[in-house]
Amino acid sequence: MKEQRKMARWWTNWGWILLYIVLMAGAVVFIMQEDRGQIEDNSPEKITLTFRHFWIKEHDRPLLAIFEEVVRNYQEQHPNVKVNFEGLDQTIHREQKLKSEMVTGTPPDMFVLFGGAEIEPYVRSDRLMDLTEFTEENGLRNQFKDLHLWTFSERIYGLPIEGNAEPLYYNKEIFTRLGLKAPSTVAELDAVILKLKAAGYIPFALGNEDRWPAGIFAHYLMDRYAGPELIQKLVTSGEQASFQNSGYSEAFRHLNTWIAGGAFSPGSNDTSTENAVRLFTGGEAAMYLNGNWDINLFSGKAAPEDFQNQVGVIPFPALVQGAEPSMAGGYTIGIGLSSSLSGAKREAALELLKGFYTKEIQTRIVYEGLRIPSMRISFDPQQTGPVFAQVMDLMEENHESFVPYDNLLSPEVKKTFLSVIEEMIDGGLAGDQALEQLQSASKQYWNLIRSSAGQ
C-alpha cells in the first residue's frame, strides 16, 4: 500500500509534465510532416502567356489551324501554362496597338510582327528579347534561309515564320481569248491594259482596304525606273538621296496614268483582299498583283472548279526588254518576344517558340498553308498545286529580289508612303505632290534621328 501511495503521488506531481511532453512531441512531428509536404510539393508554377497574331483573314485560315494545333499540343504537355492566343486586325496591331504598347513597355508576351525597319525602334528601345542564344542552343542559327531583317548589330531579335513573294497572276484563258501574250516589259503591260479595257475586262483587281496592296504597284514601278540602289540610300541616309528624283517622278507619273485610265477595279480603297480576289477568280478582272499568301483563295467555293489551272504566274515586267525582272519578297513575317519576360514565364515562352520552328511545322506551312518556308526544308512543289508550284519555279529562275518598300521604310515614312498612294488611287493626288510629301516625311524622320543622337 505504501508503494502504491508513493506511485500515486509521483503521477500527481510529474504525470502532467510527461503528458505535456508527449503532446508537444506530437505537435512537432505533425508540423514537420506538414513542412516536408510543402517542401516536397513539386507542382510547377501556374503561368499565363499572351500571344497576339493577325491570322484572321480568309486566306490565313489554313495557317491559323496549324498554329492553333501547336498551341493546343503545348498546353496539353504543359498543363500549368495557359496561352491566350488571340487574333487582331493586322493594321490595328502593327500601326496602333503594338506601337503604343512598346512605348509603355506593356506588349504581349509573344506576338507576330514584321522584321526590318518596323522592329528597329523596338530593338533600340530594348523592347524585344534577344534570341541569339536561343537559336544557337537549339541548333536553329543556320536553319533559316535569311535572318538579315531580324538581325541588328549581329544579334537576333525575332524569327521569320514564313517567306513571301509578290508575283503577277494573270488569267491565261482571257489572255488566249484576246490573243494576248504575258507581258515581259512595262510597255507591253501598258498595251495589255488598253486591250483588256477595250474588251470590257478590269485589268487589275485591287483590294486596298488595308492600304498596303496598292503600295506593291508603286514599289515595283519605283524599282523599275530608279533601280534598287536608290531606296537603300533613302533608308540608310537622309542626305545622300531624295524621293524627288527623275526616276521616281516617272514611276509615279506612270501610276497616275494607270489610275486615270481605269486600270484598277472601281472603289479599290474600299475593297477587301477577298473581294478583289473574287473579281479575279470570277473572270471580271484579268490580272492580280499580290503575295503568294493569297493563292489558297484561288480555289474553293468562290472560284471555278478548275481555276488554278487557268492562272499564269510571271514576275512584274522589267522596264526594258532583256533585263531580269526582280521580284519583291523576303522573309519578313515572324514572331518576337517581349524583353520583359523573366524566370519561369520566359522559359515557358521560349519552349512554346521552339514548337513553331520545326521541320514538321514548316512542311505543313508549305503543303497546307501554301506559304514559302522560312527554314531550309525539302518539299515537292508539284504537290502544292499548280499556282504555288509556278511561284516556286519563278523564285528558282529569278535570282534578283528586293524587300518590299513598306518593310524597308521607317514606320514614319512608310505611313506617308501608303497614305499618298491611297490618295493617288482615289484620283486626288498627283505623283509629284505625293513625292513632295514623301520627301518631307523623310526629312522630318532624319532630323529626328540626328537630334536624338545629339548631332
Image: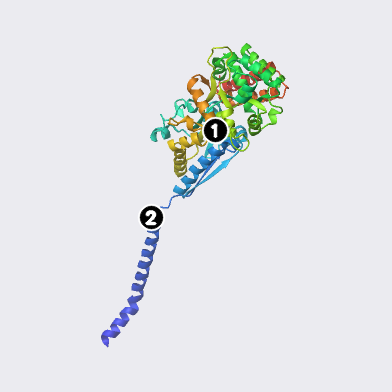
Which circle marks residue 40 in the picture? 2
Marks 1/2 in contact by CB < 8 Å: the verdict is: no
Residue tagged by mark 1? 113
User: If you read the primary sequence from the N terminus, does the residue marked by circle 1 or circle 2 appear first?
Assistant: 2
Circle 2 residues within 10 Å: few <14, some 14–19, many ≥20:
few
Mark 1 vs mark 2: give the one in front: 1
Q: Position of residue 58 (x, y in %)?
A: 60, 37
Q: Quadrant of residue 430?
A: top right
Label 1 – label 2 distance at C-alpha? 42 Å
- Residue at 46% from the left image edge and 43% from the top image edge: 348
Q: Position of residue 438 (x, y in %)?
A: 64, 20
Q: Is residue 201 visible?
A: yes
Which residue occupies the foreground of this view, 25 or 225?
A: 225
Q: Quadrant of the N terminus?
A: bottom left
Q: Residue furthest bottom?
A: 1
Q: Residue furthest left?
A: 3
- Residue at 65% from the left image edge and 16% from the top image edge: 191
Q: Amino acid at mark 2?
A: Glu
Q: Amino acid at mark 1?
A: Leu
Q: Secondary structure at mark 1?
A: strand
Which residue occupies the foreground of this view, 191 or 71?
A: 191
Circle 1 residues within 10 Å: few <14, some 14–19, many ≥20:
many
Q: Residue furthest right?
A: 428
Q: Is residue 361 above or below residue 426?
A: below
Q: Is residue 420 left or right of residue 144?
A: right
Q: Quadrant of residue 357?
A: top left
Q: Position of residue 161 (x, y in %)?
A: 49, 33
